[in-house]
């Protein structure tokens, strides 16, 4: 393989990793943009989404890409319950409460998942396992093409939802000015619950794509992706959906490039090096605005 | 609002109960021991990334204790019989968790002896506590030589009952030189003196670096005809290995030696063969001889090599076959699955603890330590040098007979199964290169 071939392959793995990050970070940013809450348990929604998909797939044999929709719907429900019963009561009472509440949720979800599914590493094989397709000079697994296509489709659907539907416009309005949204008659509590549910559904989509790509998963899998998702939304700009998309992509490519050119131990560190550099140059992040 | 507060309180209570479940399991056997009971603390990873191996170790310890107790227990100096009572400590697969587990077992549960330890990084983190309280500890999983070689603390109470990374690193490198290199040269029509192009992919921990050091040192010291063409590392717990594997493929290796845990090894080989098209021989460290590893690998394990001393699915002909079979059957009867490599040495660890206390005739820790120093007991289920378990006078390490297994795919069960291919006195079949194997090129 020549140098250009290797470079393209690294970019492709970065793009795939970026898809998982984009979905996770977009959901996190959607929730932060509307509710301005810090939810460190967001990675646990990825984990639950992964387990729902794997469990339904192993029990029924239904195509996991179809189960993705079921997993997202389930997480809309779980997210709505968590928002209504946990985050809403403490909304506006200080960031410390949000942080400790979400840390508590991490333990609840992790231990709950360990009780239900056990805490050993698991993996499942996609129905398309082993099938590859030529992409330029590369020969890539068809699952990765589907993962990239699904991510793009979900993001386009989200974009259209936010731009074209009444609820989407209300979400944007609430994100821009919560008090103003209230004054013009928007039920911001309803918008909160919808935003939280959609954010969790995006995490579930990330979890499902994680599973179908053949990566191993266990109840503790969400912690590191959640930390990276936070880094991505800070990098891209708090509350900015385009920022989360660009940040996720940048992070995926940077991590894989660093692992190749600098060594595996730099894979996680590079994300935070980039974050520090961006924050020093532009404290609001790539797409953030002052005051967010 | 009142209901919300009540709900959150209930949620926290549920969390506390759930979180306490593991702890409950750990403490339910810790009621004050009656006379005639030997308390053996077993430090394993019941939770966290290493829990699959950890639970196997804990269950194996239980099978061993059952057998010892069923045979009357341990005879002490005064002629009385004592039963083995196991108390588990969960190291949570973390250094902090290991420290907590060791401290609790020693100070709260007041165990007489300790067995277990899987991750070298975790185990080395609480060795200071062992040194401070001077409790005999038979380490059955952590394979870094630093466990008993380090000089910054007193390790005299620590006994190493598993091969170190030095030992199996040297052993695997010798196999590569003596068997793999000639097989590749023969299949590919290379000159007999062509160096074998070896790549290393290792976990960036004491364990992985230990293997890396052993391979490098063995090649240099023994002047082996092996060229290391790529050395890549990854962080413990990583699940995406495509980039380091791309780097390895670019180096055109003849074979790849992995220093990884089973939850890493199986995805590495799967991603290498499925996603990267790296159709080569993967050599694995012994901790991967684990039923979950075979399950996760599926057809991608075909042709891979595992350095081993106990397998859930094969055994060498000869003296240890019956012992291994009995242990596997007892384990299967109790837990419905088969034990793994780390379980086997932990099973033996409990027997060693019982034998040392029996020889000492007391649970006095200094006397038990001396009994371990002087120990010479027949091998239990793993093949030992001279068929005897004893600890070396310098670093208190036991000396195993190792072997290499090659995996063959069984389409009926959808998994690979191992067969011993080296050394000659233990092998059940010959090593063969798979038809799809592609040798590297300069």
Image: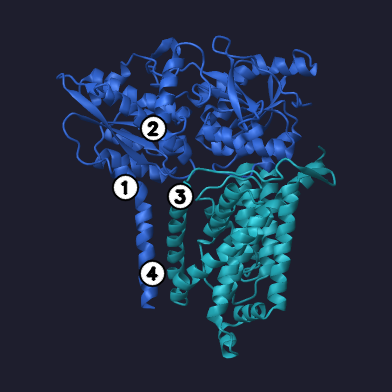
Which of the two discs, 2 and 3, sits closer to the camera?
2
Residue A146 x, y percent position in the rendering = 74, 53
Of the chain colours in the picture, the one used for chain A is cyan
What residue would you read off at disc 1?
B24
Q: Which residue is mark 4?
A: B7
Name which residue lies at 57% across and 90% down: A183
Seen as rendered, the residue at the extreme right is: A136
For disc 4, the neighbor class at 10 Å (few under 14, some 14 to 19, many from 20) is some
**What percent of the width, then of the height, locates residue B258?**
61, 31
Marks 1 and 4 sit apart, C-alpha to C-alpha, by 24 Å
Q: Residue at x 52, y 70 (%)?
A: A80
Secondary structure under badge 2?
helix
Q: Residue furthest front?
A: A60
Say whether marks 1 and 2 touch (CB < 8 Å).
Answer: no
Q: CA distance from mark 1 to mark 2?
A: 21 Å
In the image, residue A185 lies at what x, y percent? 58, 89
Please provide percent x and percent y for residue B295.
Answer: 57, 35
Q: In which image quadrant can residue B32 be found?
A: top left
* Subunit that carries the residue with mark 4: B
Query: What residue would you read off at disc 2?
Result: B334
Cα separation, mark 3 vs mark 4, equals: 22 Å
- Work out whether residue B258 or residue A271 is closer to the camera in this orientation and state it: B258
Q: Which chain is indicated by disc 2?
A: B
Chain of the residue displaying label 3: A
In which quadrant will I find the N terminus of chain B? bottom left
Disc with the residue nearer the chain's start (1 vs 4): 4
């Amino acid at each position: 393989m020549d140098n250009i071939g290797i470079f393209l392959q690294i970019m492709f793995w970065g793009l795939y990793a970026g898809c998982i990050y984009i979905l996770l970070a977009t959901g996190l940013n959607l929730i932060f943009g509307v509710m301005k809450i810090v939810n460190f348990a967001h990675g646990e929604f990825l984990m639950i989404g992964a387990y729902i998909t794997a469990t339904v797939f192993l029990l029924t044999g239904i195509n996991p890409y179809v189960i993705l929709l079921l997993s997202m719907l389930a997480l809309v429900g779980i997210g709505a319950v968590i928002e209504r019963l946990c985050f809403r009561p403490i909304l506006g009472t200080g960031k410390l409460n949000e942080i400790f509440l979400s840390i508590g949720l991490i333990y609840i979800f992790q231990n709950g998942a360990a009780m239900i599914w056990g805490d050993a590493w698991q993996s499942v094989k996609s129905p398309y396992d082993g099938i590859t397709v030529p992409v330029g000079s590369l020969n890539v697994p068809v699952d990765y093409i589907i993962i990239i296509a699904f991510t793009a489709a979900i993001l386009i659907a989200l974009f259209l939802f936010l731009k074209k539907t009444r609820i989407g416009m209300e979400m944007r309005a609430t994100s821009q000015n919560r008090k103003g949204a209230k004054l013009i008659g928007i039920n911001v509590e309803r918008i909160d619950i919808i935003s939280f549910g959609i954010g969790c559904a995006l995490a579930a989509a990330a979890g499902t794509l994680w599973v179908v790509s053949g990566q191993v998963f266990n109840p503790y899998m969400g912690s590191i992706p959640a930390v990276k998702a936070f880094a991505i939304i800070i990098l891209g700009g708090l509350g900015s959906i385009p920022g989360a998309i660009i940040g996720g992509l940048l992070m995926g490519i940077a991590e894989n490039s660093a692992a190749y050119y600098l060594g595996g131990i730099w894979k996680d560190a590079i994300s935070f090096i980039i974050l520090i550099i961006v924050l020093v140059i532009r404290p609001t992040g790539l797409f953030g605005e002052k005051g967010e | 609002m009142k209901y919300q507060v009540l709900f959150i309180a209930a949620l926290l209570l549920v969390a506390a109960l759930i979180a306490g479940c593991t702890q409950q399991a750990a403490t339910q056997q810790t009621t004050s021991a009656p006379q005639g009971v030997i308390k053996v603390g077993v430090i394993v990873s019941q939770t966290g990334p290493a829990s699959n191996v950890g639970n196997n170790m804990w269950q194996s310890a239980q099978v061993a204790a059952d057998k010892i107790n069923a045979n009357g227990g341990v005879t002490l100096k005064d002629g009385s019989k004592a039963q083995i009572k196991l108390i588990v400590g969960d190291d949570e697969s973390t250094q902090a968790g290991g420290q907590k587990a060791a401290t609790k077992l020693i100070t709260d549960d007041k165990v007489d002896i300790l067995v277990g330890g899987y991750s070298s990084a975790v185990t080395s983190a609480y060795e200071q506590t062992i040194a401070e309280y001077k409790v005999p500890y038979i380490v059955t999983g952590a394979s870094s030589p630093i466990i008993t070689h380090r000089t910054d603390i007193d390790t005299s109470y620590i006994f190493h009952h598993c091969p170190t990374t030095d030992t199996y690193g040297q052993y695997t490198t010798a196999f590569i030189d003596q068997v793999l290199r000639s097989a590749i040269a023969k299949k590919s029509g290379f000159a007999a003196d062509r160096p074998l192009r070896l790549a290393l992919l290792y976990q960036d921990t004491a364990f992985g670096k230990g293997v890396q050091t052993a391979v490098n040192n063995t090649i240099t010291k023994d002047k082996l005809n092996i060229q290391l063409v790529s050395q890549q590392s990854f962080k413990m717990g990583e699940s995406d290995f495509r980039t380091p594997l791309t780097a390895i493929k670019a180096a055109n290796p003849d074979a790849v030696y992995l220093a990884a845990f089973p939850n890493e090894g199986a995805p590495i080989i799967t991603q290498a063969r499925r996603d990267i098209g790296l159709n080569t021989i993967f050599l694995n460290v012994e901790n991967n001889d684990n039923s979950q590893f075979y399950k996760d690998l599926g057809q991608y394990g075909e042709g891979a090599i595992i350095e081993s001393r106990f397998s859930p699915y094969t055994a060498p002909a000869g003296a240890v076959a019956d012992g291994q079979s009995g242990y596997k059957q007892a384990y299967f009867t109790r837990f419905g699955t088969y034990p793994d490599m780390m379980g086997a040495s932990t099973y033996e660890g409990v027997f060693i603890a019982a034998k040392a206390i029996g020889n000492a005739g007391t649970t006095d820790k200094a006397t038990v330590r001396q009994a371990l120093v002087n120990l010479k007991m027949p091998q239990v289920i793993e093949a030992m040098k001279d068929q005897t378990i004893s600890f070396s006078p310098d670093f208190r390490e036991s000396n195993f007979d190792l072997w290499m297994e090659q995996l063959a795919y069984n389409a009926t069960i959808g998994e690979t199964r191992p067969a011993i291919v080296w050394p000659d006195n233990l092998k059940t079949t010959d090593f063969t290169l798979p038809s799809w194997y592609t040798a590297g090129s300069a």
